[in-house]
Amino acid sequence: MSVNMVDAAAIKAAISPLDFYRTELPGIPAPKRDHGWTAGGLCCFHADAHAGNFRVNLDTGGFMCFACGAKGADVIAFVQRRHAVAFRDALQMLVDAWGTRL
Ligand SMILES: [Zn+2]
């Protein structure tokens, strides 16, 4: 599937933030609830030594780190930052990884 056929909103709607972060962050603790901000385990954007700084939002896919300042509004922003790719490349990576869900 090409990113020309789907838009960012459809991609975000098709990907569960919890499923996404469980895949991207193998060390993520089991969330205490199924929505809103929750602990994300160790931050993948700096040499994090103790959990607690990095949080993810299970509703929006947003992420933020109190230690290094990494933050973004959704899973697309996470892919952009983690893989240092442009917006459209991040969309393509998400389609490739999660395409069966679209
Ligand atoms: Zn960090």
Image: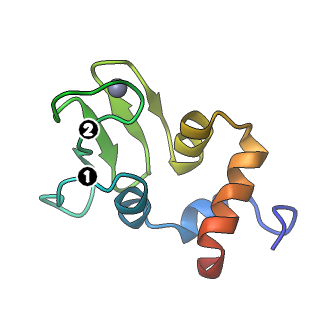
Q: Are marks 2 and 1 in contact (CB under 8 Å)?
A: yes
Residue 23 in the image: above or below residue 100 = above
User: In the structure shown, which secondary structural element does the residue marked by tag 2 occupy?
Assistant: loop
Identify residue for label 2: 42
- On residue 96, the disc is none
Residue 77, horizontal then vertical, whole percent: 57, 40
Q: Which quadrant, please, contains the C terminus? A: bottom right
- On residue 27, the disc is 1
Indicate the amino acid at tag 1.
Gly
In the visual, does 52 lie left or right of 77? left
Residue 46, horizontal then vertical, whole percent: 37, 24
* Label 1 crowd (10 A; few <14 / some 14-19 / many >=20): some
Q: Is residue 40 visible?
A: yes
Indicate the amino acid at tag 2.
Leu
- Whether disc 2's CB lies below 8 Å from ligand 1 is answered no
Q: Is residue 8 visible?
A: no
Counting the numbered discs, the total is 2
Question: Which residue is at a point 56% across and 66% down the rendered structure image?
Answer: 13
